[in-house]
Image: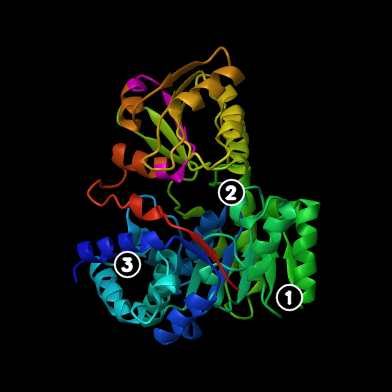
Amino acid sequence: MNYSEAIQFLYGLQIFGANFGLETPRKLATLAGDPQNRLRFIHVAGTNGKGSTCAMLESIYRVAGLRVGLFTSPHLVSFRERIQINRKLISESDIARLVSEIQESLKTFPADAHPTFFEVVTILALKFFAEQNCDLVIWETGLGGRLDATNIVTPLASVITNIAFDHEQWLGDTLGKIATEKAGIIKPGIPVVTSVKKPEVLAVIEKIAHEKNAPLTKIQKSDIRSQKSETLLGEHQKINAALAAATIRVLQKEISIKEKQIEIGLQNVNWPGRLQLVERPGGQKFLLDGAHNVAGAKVLREALEKDFPVKKRTLILGILQDKNWREICEMLSPLAGKIFVVPVASQRTACPNELAEVCRMKNPTVKVFAEASLVEALKKSGDQKFVVITGSLYLIGEALEQLGVVPVDKNERGLNEWSGGKKWSG
C-alpha cells in the first residue's frame, strides 16, 4: 500500500459516521497491543482553544528537550498534520504502513460496529507515538470528551480550556450538559487544570473533580497577567498560555521544566490559522482565524478591536451550515467596511447569499458581496490593505493554500468530513 492508497482507504471509512463510545476504540487498541500503556499524555478538552493550548504545551516541552508527540484535529490542509513529533509531520510512508497494518484488525469487527475514521486514526497515532518512543504526547480530544475515542488513555493531567455552545446536537443543549461531556476526561486522582470561568460550568467541573478525587487548579486573572506571553495576539491566547504554563507547573514532579523554558516555548509557539498574520509582497496583510462558532467569533472581535484597530477592515467570511452562522455574521459584520461572503469547500457549507443578507441587516452601511469562491473574493479584495479571513477552519486551510503559505498538492481537507449515522455507546 502506498500513501495515496492509504488516504483513499481512510476516505472510505467516512461512511461509518461518528461513534460516541469507548468500547470500539478500546478493542482496536487491544488488537494493536495497547500502545497507550507505553506512553504519557496530557489530555486536552474544551470548546475553543484546544489546539492552541496543545501547541503551547508541545512547544514548551520540546524546548526542554523532550520528544513530544502531538495529536490534533481537524487538519487544515494535509492529513499528516494530525500526527506530529517535535512538530515534524508523520511521513507518508509511515501512514501507508500503519494503515496497511491496521486493516487486518478491522476485519474482526462486524459491519454494524465497524470502527469510524476518527477511531482508526486515534489508534494509528497511539501506535506511531509508541513506536517512536515519545517522552510525552499532547493529546487533543476530537468531540466532547467522555465518549470520545481519545478518552481510552490515562493522562498525567486533564486540561479543560473553556465551555461554550457548539455541537449541541451531540453534546447537549445547555452549558451544563456540554460541560459534563467535556469533563468526562477527568480521571480518578489525576490533576485537572482549567481556565473555565462561567459559574454554572465551573460548578460541573468542580463536582466531577471532587467525585473523582482529582486535584483541581483554576486559572486566575493574576496567572494571566503574570505569564510572559507578549508575543501572543488576543486576550484568549494569553489565557491559553497561562493554562499551558499552569499545567506544566502542576506536573513539575513528573517532568521538571524551568520557567525560562516556559517563556521561550511560548515565544516560539506556532499554530497556523489562529490569529495568524500573513503579509504578502506589496504589503497587503491577512489575518487568518478559524472562528468557527459564536464563542470563537466573540474572541476574534475582541482581538480585532484591541490588537488591530484598523479603520478599514475587509472581511472574507465562510461558515458551515451546522454552525450558528447567523449570530457569527451579526457579531463580525459591524467590524468591516467591506465584506465578501464565500462558500466553504464542504458539503456542509452555509449559503453565501443567506450570510450576505444577515450581514447587510446588521450593518446596513457595509458593502457586502456574495462570491462563488474564496479565489474570487481574494481577487476582488486585492486592493484592500487589511483583510480578515474567518468563519471556518476549512476556509482557513484553503486560504493558506491560496496565499502560498502551504503547498497546494496535498489538499486532504475532505478527510475532515464524515457521513452516515451517529452511534452512541458507553
Q: Nearer the viewer, residue 33 or 224?
A: 33
Q: Position of residue 228 (x, y in %)?
A: 61, 53
Foreground pick, 166 / 338: 166
Q: Label 1 is placed on what type of residue?
A: Ala
**Kind of residue at disc 3:** Ile
Using the image, determine if residue 362 lies above or below residue 95: above
Query: Badge 2 local density, few (<14 within 10 Å), some, or many (20+)?
Result: many
Secondary structure beneath dot 2 equals helix
On the question of residue 264 being in view, the answer is: no
* Label annotation for residue 214: 1
Residue corresponding to mark 2? 237
Q: Do the residues labelled 3 and 1 touch (CB within 8 Å)?
A: no
Front tag of 2 and 3: 3
Taking the image as shown, residue 354 lies to the left or right of residue 105, namely right
Is there any visible trace of residue 138 in the rendered image?
yes
Q: Distance between the residues labelled 2 and 1?
A: 26 Å
Residue 16 is covered by the magenta coloring: no
Q: Which of marks 2 and 1 is nearer the N terminus?
A: 1
Magenta-drawn segment: 380-394
Reading the image, the residue beneath label 3 is: 90
Q: In which quarter of the image is the N terminus?
A: bottom left
Q: Residue at x 33, y 78 (%)?
A: 102
Give the secondary structure at mark 1: loop
What is the distance, in whole Å, between disc 2 and disc 3 at their CAs?
27 Å
Q: Which mark is residue 194?
A: none
Viewer-side residue, 374 vs 8: 8
Which tag, 2 or 3, sits closer to the chain's start? Answer: 3
At mark 3, the secondary structure is loop
* 36 lies above or below 180: below
- Three-letter code for the amino acid on which mark 2 is drawn: Gln
